Amino acid sequence: MSQADGLAVIDKEAGWTSHDVVAKARGVFGTRKVGHAGTLDPDATGVLLLGVGRATRLLRFLTPLPKQYVGELVLGAETTTLDAAGEVTAVHDMSRVTPDQVSEAASEFVGDIMQVPPMVSAVKVGGRRLYKLAREGVEVEREARPVTVHELAVSPVDPGAGVYRIEVSCSSGTYIRSLAADIGTALGGGGHLRALRRMAIGSFAVDEARPVSTPALLSMTEALRDYPELLVDEPLGQRVGSGQAIAIDELSAQGEGPWAVIGSQGQLLAVYQSHAPGLAKPVVVIPW
């Protein structure tokens, strides 16, 4: 594997867009072949996954991984962006709201819920990104989308000022800004999010993340550590490397996949998934 093939777990700092981080990483790694999985807002910090070299082909498998966040819910003020970066559009007196009421309201958003994406997001409507429309002062109807909030905990930081710590474990595609605003609305007023930090994407947690100026590369095999691994010998590995469809039983695979197929030297050969009854085919093949 060449030096510039792998996954970088970055701790993004505030003030950088995800594209800024990619641009910086291109210079650090000396290649234009860098992409990211899971956009973070400029004001947000925390885990951003970068695929470098051939590992950019694996980003499609990292984007759907569940996410973990911490941030602050600020009750009493609504903003244009649903977070502290936006302009205040409405103010509510929520001084009588208690921590127990906040916890009770938040509990209603645990599980499978429908969520309307914020205008300042990368979702496309009519072929255009919402954030681009928002910059033009245009607001459009957005369809609610299903997301899953696995865990949601709130705890008082400064309840007199309406500030609460919010900890969220959720499916990919969940907007924490929308969650904060919806909790505020459910309490009879409004709210917004500030100080968002992504703590993990799948098993890739902030404690192993590094600044983009001094990144480390995980191997492509390690990049898919959240998926089941199928270890194959050299003869079968040659067939995998040529992109053949293979019987699921021959791969000793279970379920529907995707599976990371690993060669005899520990290298990632391909990503396979179920294609037809009893048969698996590659989604990605890594040339060596």
Image: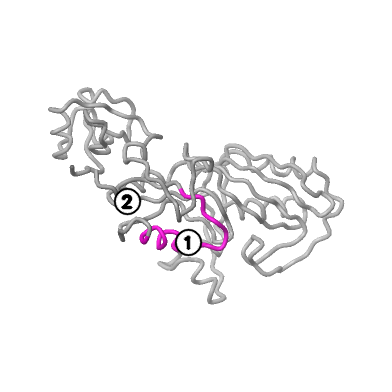
Range of residues picked out in magenta: 10-27
124 relative position to 80: left or right: left
Which residue is more in the foreground, 132 or 125? 132
Q: Is residue 20 magenta?
A: yes
Residue drawn at 33 percent across, 51 percent down? 52
Q: Amino acid at mark 2?
A: Thr
- Secondary structure of the residue carrying numbered label 1: loop
Residue drawn at 72 percent across, 57 percent down? 191
Q: Position of residue 68 (x, y in %)?
A: 56, 42
- Secondary structure of the residue carrying numbered label 2: helix
Does 279 appear above or below 129? above
Q: Which residue is mark 1?
A: 122
When asked about the image quadrant of residue 235, the answer is top left
131 relative position to 274: left or right: right
Residue drawn at 21 percent across, 26 percent down? 232
Q: Position of residue 15 (x, y in %)?
A: 56, 63
Which residue is more in the foreground, 14 or 253? 14
Q: Residues within 10 Å of mark 1 (few under 14, many from 20)?
A: some
Location of the C terminus (image quadrant) = top left
Label whose residue precedes the other's in the sequence (1 or 2):
2
Residue that sits furthest to the bottom in the current view: 136
